[in-house]
Amino acid sequence: MCLVPMTDNISLPGADWTAMTASYDDRALLLGETLVVADLHVGRGTGGNLELPVGSGSDMVQRFQSLVERHDPAEVIIAGDLLHSFRTVPRSVESTVAGLKSACQAVGARLLVTPGNHDTMLDSVWDGPTETTYRVGETVVCHGHEAPDVDAERYVVGHDHPTISIEGQRQPCYLVGSGQYRGSDVVMLPSFNRLNAGVEVNEMRASDFQSPLVTDADRLEPVVWDESGRETLSFPPLGEFRRML
């Protein structure tokens, strides 16, 4: 299958999207002056045998810092599952969260969390602002594990950790779908944590997704961020994509 590069500035579904610049970068989504990342799962891998677990600790802070330095956002939204463990918070988690805070402070960005289902211990490491849903213009950001009770033109979520297999290689991907939830559009972000293997969406149906915001998987369009070329690669909707394999 041939990959089709796109430009960094993208056009996502919704009538008012042209009023806001949107771009992808390293599993994040930039909406005007708002940077959104999801599913950091800070603390995952700290109990294993890896001395420097990829995707955790300093690696995550460095990638996060690079993002905010490149884009200089006014605010950064963590769309749920900042933490990984439901019961304990390893000591290293505190330093990682402090590093995320420091990166935002260095560029004058406000950092906010929309808690996810893993964030049962959030209060132990986070004293900053939290919102169940956070509105950016006509876009609402939330984790996506529960159906939001606010209306929006589109919803930006995480939760399912989407990946896609292309020519034998599995890549984290964004999923962009029109009319997914109450007639509104949904953009699902991949997990920012590189330790998360993610869920392969190639053959998934709507009922296979954990997020209730996905109602028609065939209409979800995968988008892959190619770090080596620093460009986005877009694909047909999953319904058509499956027929091409």
Image: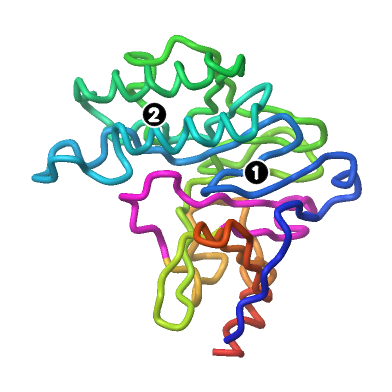
Q: Nearer the viewer, residue 21 or 212?
A: 21
The image position of residue 229, as x and y in percent, is 56, 62
Kind of residue sitting beneath label 1: Val
Residue at 71 percent of width and 35 percent of height: 140
What's the residue at 59%, 51% (across, down)?
A: 188
Split into 4 quadrants, where in the image is the N terminus?
Answer: bottom right
Q: Which class describes the residues within 10 Å of circle 2: few (<14), some (14-19), or many (20+)?
A: some
User: Which SS class for mark 1?
Assistant: strand
| Extreme residue in the top direction | 127
Residue wearing tag 1 = 156
Q: Position of residue 215 (x, y in %)?
A: 64, 61
- Mark 1 vs 2: CB contact within 8 A: no
**Which residue was labeled with disc 2?**
119
Q: Is residue 27 above or below residue 106?
A: below
The amino acid pointed to by label 2 is: Asp
Residue 235: x, y in percent? 65, 73
Residue 9 as seen in the image, left or right of residue 193: right
141 vs 95: above or below? below
Q: Is residue 215 above or below residue 242?
A: above
Per the model, the C-alpha gap separating discs 1 and 2 is: 18 Å
The picture places residue 92, in percent across and down from the top left corner, at 22, 24
| Range covered by the magenta-colored residues | 174-199
